[in-house]
Amino acid sequence: MLRARADALRTLSANTGGVAVLNSNDLTGSLRQIVEDLRSYYLLGYYSSNTALDGKYRRIEVKVRRPGVEVRARDGYHAASAEEVARGVPASAPAPAAEREAADAAIAGLSAVRFDTPLLLGAVPLRSGRATEIRIVGEIPAATIRDAAWRQGGRATILVTGTAGATLGMARATLRPGERTFDATVPLDGETAGECRIQVRLSPDGAGAPVGEVLRVVLPPPGQPPPVLGAPMLFRRSAGPAGPLVPTADPRFRRTESARVDVPATAGASGVSARLLDRTGEALNVPVTIGERVDDRFGQRWLSADVTLAPLTTGDYLVELTASEQGASHRVLVALRVRQ
């Protein structure tokens, strides 16, 4: 029975281009082998020139000229028969033009992000009655954080000003040693509306030059009801499902991470759903987990969408979160860039 189980695993892995890790009590070494196997590879596909619908088995052989390269490929596949094609599910209709335009606009936002900046910023305005605050996330890129000046952490000063230059709010935040992000909340004074300017200056606790960046956000008028789905916040998780959830201002993720989108929502939002889309707005068969929570401040309701990025190849994707209120549908699209 044990041999049969092991043979089944070996057969499954051999036929799908994988590796079966068996008969070892070295769990750390086995997991390291799996991680190394998934971290760096080329995934190639092709369209067969043989279009005959004969239902026959066709063998595949893959060769490379470069020595020392390991190639894994399926031994072959069964071609579809004419009867199977006739019984098949018709191709799904393309996304409507409005949805494609929204997807294009969200993806275009990735090109507007200055990834060469020494400080990335993200902000979400929140309002309860006439009280307004802005939650701000700052992130130091990995290339900057390697500087010895940042190993001891740093301190951020945040200044929010209105269109006329008047100060609306100030706050300070701490970048802890060994971390790349800080998260701060800035209460705003008075009834604020319109565009505001967020200026952040981050100084290292070690000997080094400070970095700074400016972000602009638009605040809705105080008397206007909040949107059913507000501005999103991004989080990343790097150590599996039990790893810490860290806010991020960088929309670039690795395949070894998972991404989470948090969106403030009204109490009446219902029928919540979430999907992962490709850059053209077409749905992908990748599960997205939906969650909900209410924070202590303002009693704000948050909807969340979690997606594991391991099944994806490098490229740009969209997390779509939808909800309805009083018969109207509302949607938020958040663009992500998946790196190796």
Image: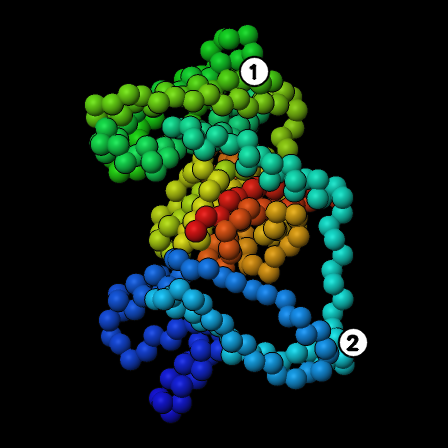
Q: Is residue 290 above or below residue 158?
A: below
Residue that carries the numbered disc 1 in the rendered image: 191
What is the x, y in percent for residue 317? 57, 48
Residue that carries the numbered disc 2 in the rendered image: 86
Q: Is residue 50 rendered to the left or right of residue 43?
A: right
Q: Residue furthest right?
A: 86
Q: Is residue 225 rendered to the left or right of residue 75?
A: right
Q: Which residue occupies 55% across, 55% down?
A: 288
What is the x, y in percent for residue 180? 33, 36
What is the x, y in percent for residue 34? 35, 65
The answer to which of 3 and 175 lies nearer the viewer is 3
Q: Is residue 290 rendered to the left or right of residue 268?
A: left
Q: Which residue occupies 40% across, 64% down?
A: 66
Considering the numbered disc 1 on the image, is that residue within a helix, a strand or a loop? loop
Considering the numbered disc 2 on the image, is that residue within a helix, a strand or a loop? helix
Q: Which residue occupies 47% across, 11% down?
A: 167
Task: Single out the mark in the foreground, 1 or 2.
Answer: 2
